[in-house]
Amino acid sequence: MKIRSDSLFAELGRANLRDDFFAFFAASSPSYAEMTDWLKGRGIKASLAALHNLVTFHYTQWQTQKAIGAADAEALSLPDNVDQVTRDYIKGLRLNLAMRDITVEQALTLIRLDQDKEKNNIASRKLALLEAREEKARATVSDTTLTPEEQTARIREIFGLK
């Protein structure tokens, strides 16, 4: 789900208050009036509908992002000589611990977020490869020492064309 830039969730993020608010929410189970007062004390106005969306939809998103971050941080703190299978196993255990208090819907959201993150990483690597190829092609085209046939041959080689 795309987050609207004018949402309370986004505003809390810009103010670096998102973690503080959700920690307050998780610890206190406050009423809407108490949440409104908490926000007013920090200079943020919010309607009841915005608060409802925040605690109904975005709290789950925040929890899952924190669970992913905790699992990733755990994997990063392992010694270098630990193999990938062990790292993945430990990450899985950490995710299981983080997910023990969340619903099935929240767990599925967590899995989707993790998959989306991996897809974005793959897309970033593909883009970097394409940009490198494009740079090589530009350098080849601008190389005046090459004949047009040599330029064509190199460009075909760069892009893997026969």
Image (tube, rainbow, N blue to C red):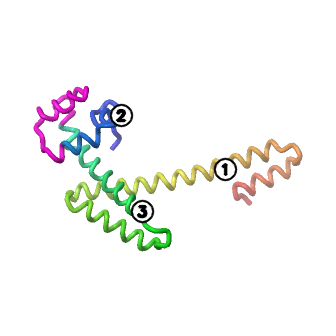
Q: Which quarter shows the N terminus?
A: top left
Q: Which residue is mark 2?
A: 14
- Disc 3 versus disc 1: distance between alpha carbons? 32 Å
Q: Earlier in the sequence, mark 2 or mark 3?
A: 2
Residue 99, image quadrant: bottom left
Could you tell me which secondary element the residue under label 3 belongs to? loop
Q: Position of residue 78 (x, y in %)?
A: 43, 66
Q: Residue 26: within the magenta?
A: yes
Q: Of tags 2 and 3, which is closer to the observer?
A: 3
Q: Which residue is mark 3?
A: 77
Q: Which residue is mark 1?
A: 132
Q: Residue 36: within the magenta?
A: yes
Q: Is residue 122 above or below residue 40?
A: below
Q: Closer to the camera, 21 or 8? A: 21
Could you tell me which secondary element the residue under label 2 belongs to? helix
Most frequent secondary structure within the magenta stretch: helix
Q: Of tags 2 and 1, which is closer to the observer?
A: 2
Q: Which residues are magenta?
A: 25-51
CA neighbours of label 2 inside 10 A, class few (<14), some (14 to 19), many (20+): few
Residue kind at label 1, given as amino acid type: Ala
In the displayed structure, does residue 117 sit left or right of residue 132?
left
Residue kind at label 3, given as amino acid type: Ser
Q: Residue at 18% x, 33% y: name it.
A: 38
- Disc 2 versus disc 3: distance between alpha carbons? 29 Å
